[in-house]
């Protein structure tokens, strides 16, 4: 049976879809069988992030409404043969219930090691529907107080017994080193939950959501092994040379 993990975070734009896509890629790269399900109905874009938008024939709502079998809605990744995406539909938002989604997930989860669910922003009905079909939650948060507050509210809204872990995304090592940004460790301690990963602010990710990197590899290893190694965004910007690098970054050199 698959580990079913919802990627959530409360605040919009913190990187939930980015983490879902790249964590899925990194897990599949480790020969894990992975299904990514887009439950951000209405503003679904996991298919765009995974670059399979033009291959969508059936979606989750077609499965729920029995127009096709679950496997007919799977889109296999071009580069990772054990990775599949089940896209969502921007219509029929209200008719789909958490129970229906849970039924779909339970029909397919024997075929996968991981089912990652991309959750919408907020803590309303769409959030509840997404968290209902998972046993674990990865809360994605950026090192800004508003995001930390929203992540905290999200954690308090999760179903009891959900295993919660936190990924701090968009960390700027230069700003952490100069004391202008919360460090990932401060965020973990504010939220009081298990640390799962640290992801740096990255131009590669900004230009192309689908982007393999060492930080996502470490995150995937942590998820598989239960270890907690964290990507170091900061040491590059410490010491005399680090101060020089910070100055260069600030001046856009
Ligand atoms: N580590 C990063 N470095 C640079 N850009 C990032 C990083 N993480 C995410 N982004 C960018 O931030 C934007 C929002 O990311 P994403 O769509 O994953 O957020 P989201 O939480 O899923 O948003 P929504 O709440 O709207 O679903 C994207 O353009 C993405 O490329
Ligand atoms: Mg998203």
Image (cartoon, grey):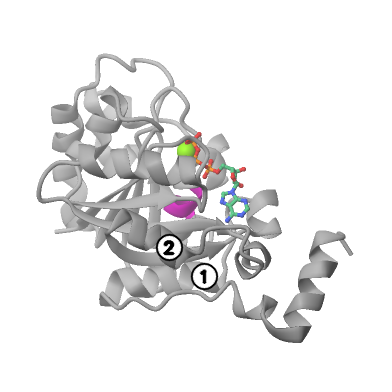
Q: Position of residue 131 (x, y in %)?
A: 23, 39
Helix, strand or loop at label 2? It is: helix
Q: Nearer the viewer, residue 69 or 207?
A: 207
Can you say which quadrant of the picture contains the C terminus? bottom right
The residue sitting at 20% across, 46% down in the picture is: 134
Eyeballing the image, is 19 above or below 248? Answer: above
Residue topped by disc 1: 215
Q: Is residue 192 visible?
A: yes
Residue 47 horizontal side relative to residue 7, left or right: right
Q: Is residue 24 visible?
A: no
- The disc, 1 or 2, on the residue closer to the chain's N-terminal end is 2
Is the residue marked by circle 1 packed among few (<14), some (14-19), or many (20+) residues within 10 Å? Answer: many
Residue 121 horizontal side relative to residue 70, left or right: right
Q: Position of residue 108 (x, y in %)?
A: 20, 47
Give me the disc on residue 186: 2
Please tell me whether mark 1 or mark 2 is closer to you in this view.
2
Q: Nearer the viewer, residue 73 or 21?
A: 21
Q: Nearer the viewer, residue 60 or 238?
A: 238
Magenta stretch, main secondary structure, is helix
Q: Which residue is farthest bottom?
A: 240
Please give the range of residues in magenta: 17-21
Ligand 1 located in image quadrant: top right
């Amino acid at each position: 049976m698959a580990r079913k993990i919802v990627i959530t975070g409360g605040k919009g734009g913190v990187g939930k879809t980015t983490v879902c896509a790249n964590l899925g890629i990194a897990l599949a790269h480790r020969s894990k069988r992975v299904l990514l399900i887009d439950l951000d109905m209405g503003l679904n874009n996991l298919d765009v992030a995974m670059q399979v938008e033009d291959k969508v024939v059936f979606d989750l709502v077609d499965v729920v409404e029995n127009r096709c079998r679950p496997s007919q809605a799977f889109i296999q990744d071009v580069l990772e043969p054990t990775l599949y995406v089940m896209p969502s539909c921007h219509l029929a938002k209200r008719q789909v219930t958490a129970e229906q989604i849970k039924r779909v997930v339970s029909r397919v989860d024997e075929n996968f090691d991981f089912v990652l669910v991309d959750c919408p922003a907020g803590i309303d009905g769409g959030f509840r529907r997404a968290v209902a079909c998972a046993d674990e939650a990865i809360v994605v948060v950026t090192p800004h107080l508003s995001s930390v507050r929203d992540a905290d509210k999200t954690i308090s809204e999760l179903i009891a017994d959900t295993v919660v872990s936190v990924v701090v995304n968009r960390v700027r090592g230069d700003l952490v080193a100069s004391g202008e940004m919360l460090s990932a460790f401060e965020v973990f301690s504010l939220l009081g939950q298990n640390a799962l990963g640290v992801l740096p602010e990255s131009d590669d990710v900004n230009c192309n959501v689908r982007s393999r990197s060492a930080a996502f590899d470490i995150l995937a290893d942590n998820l598989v092994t239960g270890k907690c190694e964290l990507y170091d965004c900061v040491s590059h910007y410490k010491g005399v040379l680090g101060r020089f690098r910070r100055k260069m970054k600030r001046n856009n050199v």
